[in-house]
Amino acid sequence: MGTISLDFDGVLHSYQYGWQDGTIYGSLMPGAANALRHLMTQHAVAVTTCRKPLLDVADWIAEETGIATVVDTGDFRFWTRDDRILVTGRKLPALIYIDDRGYRFEGWDQTLLDLPCLLG
């Protein structure tokens, strides 16, 4: 069993109102709760966010999905539990990182060519 890491905003949380004041506005993304339950049958799941406090994110996920969460206190080097979701501000080792703003890095030459188009 490996870990799957998910970004919070835009992947689990709709982020429809943007950052605003850091409060979690918006709703759970359609299908997110079922997807989390499915992922947890075979993997550990970690949610990464830059929001503070992490407890607000953990509580929101638990309330919206009914899935238990735990807040990273900085003690974990890896996340391997499949009975709850880790909420962290760190990028822990994972099989894959799912992010709505991700870019697949395959080398600097291609990245430098792609950036102007990606950034608009």
Image (cartoon, rainbow, N blue to C red):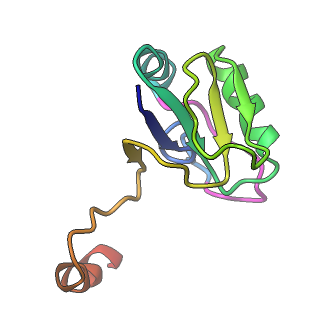
Q: Residue at 77%, 45% (x, y): give it.
A: 54
113 above or below 63?
A: below
Query: Where residue 36 sits in the image (x, y, percent)?
Result: 48, 23
Q: Between 34 and 5, which is closer to the camera in this rendering?
A: 5
Query: Where residue 102 sits in the image (x, y, percent)?
Result: 37, 59
Q: Residue at 37%, 41% (x, y): give it.
A: 95
Residue 37 located left or right of residue 68? left
118 above or below 10?
A: below
The overriding secondary structure of the stretch rendered in magenta is loop
Query: What is the quadrant of residue 66 in the picture?
Result: top right
Q: Residue at 64%, 34% (x, y): give it.
A: 86
Residue 54 located left or right of residue 97? right
Q: Residue at 54%, 20% (x, y): give it.
A: 82
Q: Quadrant of the C terminus?
A: bottom left
Residue 70 located left or right of residue 42? right
Stretch of the chain drawn in magenta: 18-29
